[in-house]
Image (spheres, coloured by chain):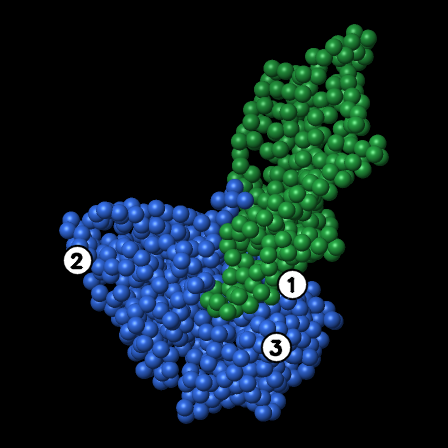
Chain colours: A blue, B green
Amino acid sequence: MRRHPWLLALLALAIAIAIPACGGDDDDEGGNGASAAGETGIPEEFAAPTAPPENAQEGGDLTVLATDDVDYMDPGPAYYQFTYMVTSAAHRTLMGWQPDDTTEPSPDLAAEEPEISEDNKTITFTIRDGVKFSPPVDREVTSADVKYAIERGLLPGVATAYLPSYLGDVVGFKQAQKQAQQNPTGGAPDIEGIKTPDDKTLVIELERPTAATVIQALSLPISAPVPEEYAQEFDAQNPSTYGEHVVFTGPYMVENNAEGELVGYKPGREIRLVRNPNWDPETDWRPAYLDSITIREGFADTASASRRILDGSAQINGDLTPPPNVIQEAAQNAEPGQLTATPSGGNRYIALNTQAPPFDDINVRKAVVAASDRVAMRNTRGGELVGSVATHFIPPNFPGFEEAGGVEGTGVDFLAKPEGDIELAKEYMREAGYESGMCEGDCTVTIVGDGASPDKETTAVFEDALRALGFEPQTRGVARDIMYTRFCGNPKAAPNVCPSVGWLKDFNDPQSMLQPTFSGDQIQPSNNVNWPQLDVPEINEAIDEATLIADEEERAQAWGEIDKMITEQAAAVPYIWDNQVNIQSADVAGVINLFNANWDLSFTSLKAE
Amino acid sequence: MLRYIARRLLWAVALLFIVMAVIFVIFNVLPTADPAQLRAGRGASVEQIEAIRQSYGLDDPIYVRFARYVEGVVTEFDLGTSIFQNNAPVRDIIFDRLPATLMLTLGAVILWLAIAIPVGVISAIRRRSLLDRTTMIATLTLISAPVFWLGLVALYLFAQDVGLISIFPGIGAYSEATTFMGKVSAMILPWIVLASATAAIYARYIRSQMIEVMSEDYIRTARAKGVPEGLVVRRHGLRSALTPVVTLLGIDIGVLLAGNAILTETVFNIPGIGGELASAIGQSDYELIQGIVLFGAFFIVILSLIVDILYAYLDPRVRYT
């Protein structure tokens, strides 16, 4: 089964940046989206355009080249950066992200900003007039369609992965969850705290004052309306087959037939988006210049696909990332604007298992972090353009980033030198009881990482740091899914080091970066994403308190402080804040959506000939 | 004859059942990643994972799951659903990819036979000539060149989108073509690449077979009786030399239809079984891998059967026993 490692390497490289769990980023500057090179490592000439040109022309067919498919066409379980590229053009969620939105989503299906009660426990949305479902449903969207969309996410046949994390505080959520588990094909369970007093009003009642987080989460595809009378027969199957019959509310829709079957979607091959005849531009802030968009999938050789985009016409990249040599070529030879880089709102780090020797000793952890050459680790992924060297965990241009110390870092000495500081590392080893500054006795360190490039090269750099301190790394390179489900996400089988992990935000809130990954309360026996298994009561408590803060500034301050506390624990070696590199043909006037760090299909146009 | 075919068909069914059991054990008893976790997605809670495990029957005893799987395959040809392709039925994905693989395989087979037979025969009857030595060096070079490398070189030299000399349609051209002739045109470069290495192997094999056959007594007798040399080569020599080639060809076609054109399909982005298998492996999409492997096994078993029947027809010494 694994006779073709080169192929897996290509695939891994292509999906490397697109960690399943969405993506994107924001930029405090807005407007043209010029990211400060100092924070993100992105030179001005490669800054992402976030607005269409004034003379953007209407019409034309754009082709998107991709390696893999969207994860789901059904907006319910959709949870992947590339999928969001499609859903943001084809669906209208309660809140949406305009290309230059940085910290706050804009009302989309919602007519205006939601009303939040004083106690932060009740949110009231008003549904916009004139938004209609695509054929064959052809009727106006009501608040009941949003309620159904959320509730069906609890069905095992839909299974929205992030629902319990962000909407778990909705009154009656847990009872509804149990009901869905007991009767997986019996229809969507009623969530008591989601109410629809009339067709235009949606009220969400919460058990805890977490309104700010819930509103951000409702910018994800889960709040794209689903008509119950149409979808229930598909949802009665397990898994739901609504994904083959989705109806849309955005400017584009996947081509379908009279029965609603998506004839324009061939899984793994092609997605053909055409204009939604029921979309009214008067109700939307999307300009939607293009006539149609064809997404062609299966381009496993990212080098030739990237060259085809750069040398060709009317093409952009989807999930594929140009390999380092093509990036280098394009940086020198491509026309201005063909190559852009955008902070993805993600980080990558090497997780040290804090629950087992030798890394249950904080001084050993500090020693290893200090000895790591994070510049070399970053360079294994392609150099400065693909991201700056991380000094903590909240990425640049993100609430809490500056509060945690910005680019300079939190001030801890063991992360002060990005190329590594072996003398300091040895001092920490001495503090840990190793008099020689080197490991003595049983010095075996087990590592399970992604066996494909570029992760295996990153791991090799880290192994050097371990050896410099006398450790004996025993590395096992496996496929990414195996690494997560069998080892790193399974605390009982977790190795000492998981070197190929990282996190992409779910939305622009530091809670979505730090809570799942570093709260001890989030450690679970399987599918665990707190890879270092960090369980520090003070940090857990601080996270609990910070989730309830509504004021933006206070919230950023609190999460910045939490980031400092986590960094101080040396539970991981942060080595990159990712940038997403995107490319387009010279005749495309592409617009990047900073939230998703990818092309915004509703704002992109073709240049006039 | 009919009795022989019936007996072979029964064996084929038994063999497929064994293959099904082995594949099921590999992907269900010894899975490398947890299917429930994969389907739930990253960050999903333990409760969500358990709900998925229960609702898909992944917590049922292994024999129950196997019985369900066999029943699905036999009664509805249901091979399960893909985790990563919108829950699409594996059967539909395979049938969607099959035409491209069939076209790639058949075209390449015709091309490699068209090259290998004359080259092999001429090299054999002009042994140690300049032509023989040149073709044998060329075939050795082609055998040594990995298909993916050959594919990339062909693309960068001759593809219309990324090549130095725009001659043939490039990557993804097959999917973009809307007419049959367009698809044929898109297949020219993949056919050449896929056929090259195999044609080289076949040419060498046919050459050695021909050399052996041409030194047989009955060939000498034919010549002594004054049969023209061309007829001796074609009717007496080639027919005998090709008999073992048929066995090889049957297996090769089966293997290609089973997804072994993985590299060619991937390099040229041809939406075939091989490319799909590569993608499924990369994503640990076990039901899809399992379905494709079973489907491939079916092809190999059927083609082996056809070859055995054909072999008996070609070689009268083989009896239907």
Is tag 3's residue or tag 1's residue first in the polypeptide sequence? 3
Contact (CB < 8 A) between labels 3 and 2? no
Q: Nearer the viewer, residue A308 or A110?
A: A110
Q: What's the amino acid at mark 3?
A: Ala
The residue tagged 2 is A431
Amino acid found under the numbered disc labelled 2? Glu
The residue under the point 48% across, 44% down is A5
Q: Residue furthest top?
A: B224
Q: Secondary structure at mark 3?
A: loop
- CA gap, disc 3 and disc 1: 26 Å
The residue depicted at 51 percent of the width and 44 percent of the height is A2
Q: Which badge, 1 or 2, is on the more N-terminal residue?
A: 1
Mark 1 = which residue? A265
In the rendered image, which quarter contains the C terminus of chain B? Answer: top right
Q: Residue at x 63, y 53 (%)?
A: B63
Of circles 3 and 1, the one toward us is 3
